[in-house]
Image: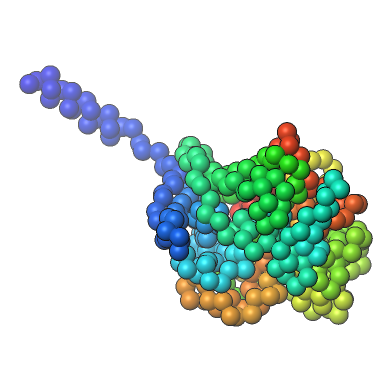
Amino acid sequence: MRTYLVIIALAVIASCQIPELPMPMIERTSFGTLPDGEEVDRFQLRNTAGVEASIITYGATLTALTVPDRDGFMEDIVLGHDTLSGYLEANPYFGSIVGRYANRIAGGSFTLDGETHTLARNNGPNHLHGGVRGFDKVNWEVGEVIEDTNQVGLTLNYVSADGEEGYPGTLTVRVTYLLTEDNRLIVDYEAITDKATPVNLTQHAYFNLAGGGSIMGHHLTLAASHYTPVDSTLIPTGEILPVEGTVFDFLGGKRIGDQIDHDDPQLLYGGGYDHNFVLNRVSRDLMLAATVLEPESGRILEVHTTKPGIQFYTGNFLDGSITGKKEVRYGRRTGFCLETQYYPDSPNQTNFPSAILRPGKVYQTQTVFVFRTQE
Ligand code: BGC
């Protein structure tokens, strides 16, 4: 009996002495059911600083991202919906993973190794974001759930069949989301194929670092000395032009709203910025592509990537017709996207970096979103 008491006493003392270390955590809950009966799950990733990222299996979508301002007040900084039905009914790719080919392919067709492939024309005369049922509209399979002391996350898998949306080859895709203790959201993309195919995967989050309202006062810096101008249907003309002396010069940083309403014909086509910027690469390594500061809250977003380009889109097509989270109507230019990517229409543009993945090769790219505040 005495021995038992001693053991219990020692156990109590030991449990008091070992301080419980705070750990990042990940929680899985149901986010609803698709019309075909498939379950959609939500993973809430949370680090010990309180930063939270929610990801659902449908579209591998980032549905919420809560980060502190300079005084520690937390705000959700991405647009989206509270419910699955919101994503099914009205969703201009809020937070989705976009594929097989992000952005536009002219005329919905491209020729590869002598064979012409026909894709859906789901955006005027062009193909956009993978077609009618792109990767944003499929329910991804959960792979690994990652729970380390310094990061939490998950892998999501999708196998895109040969011929799906007109693309050649069975494409096996894996996307990994990781939320780290130092406030980074890492998105890793991997894919393999059994036939040559274009692949361009991106994260289509619409950010608003103030948590709502216009994005015009956000201050943007882009590491891009060149951009790819477009025609009236937003297809690149093939030129790679210097930004110097134009409204596209964000090298030194400026407010998004500073020149957005200038009468540059390039801005008139998409009703604001909707352009691919050519990143100033010196290697294939991860580089800082974009920095955005929201001066009121002091929130700063950095976008780092291994990809060659970044689409800067200012939510010009949001028109108040979509009601999103917390019953907020998303008006024009209330969210911006910084989509790391291969250049739009590269399958038809010989002078753009090639986005063709061939059998035996691995598509491997990474984008890292860093959150910090201005003091
Ligand atoms: C495109 C825009 C498009 C938006 C939503 C962006 O990636 O560049 O033109 O309207 O996605 O579909």
Answer with left or right where residue 79 lies relative to residue 216. Answer: left
How many marks overall? 0
Q: Position of residue 192 (x, y in %)?
A: 68, 39
Image point (52%, 63%), residue name: 76
Check the image and name the residue furthest to the top: 3
Residue 119 in the image: state x and y as whole percent: 73, 60
Q: State the image coordinates of residue 335 (x, y, percent, origin top left).
A: 64, 69
Image quarter (top left, top right, bottom left or bottom right) of the N terminus: top left
**In the visual, does 161 lie left or right of 154?**
right
On the picture, is 247 further left or further right than 158? Answer: right
- Above or below, 305 against 319 in this view is above
Toward the viewer: 59 or 23? Answer: 59
Nearer to the camera, 198 or 238: 198
Asked whether, in this view, residue 282 is left or right of residue 296, the answer is right
Which residue of the protein is positioned furthest toward the left in this rendering? 1
- Of 66 and 296, nearer the camera is 66
As displayed, is residue 11 above or below residue 180? above
Residue 86 locus on image (x, y percent): 50, 69
Residue 262 visible in the snapshot: yes
Q: At 85% from the left edge and 56% from the top edge, which residue is drawn?
A: 348
Q: Name above or below for residue 150 compared with residue 69.
A: above
Residue at point 39% right, 53% down?
A: 29
Q: Can residue 187 be seen in this view?
A: no
- Image point 33% across, 32% down: which residue? 18
The quadrant the C terminus occupies is bottom right
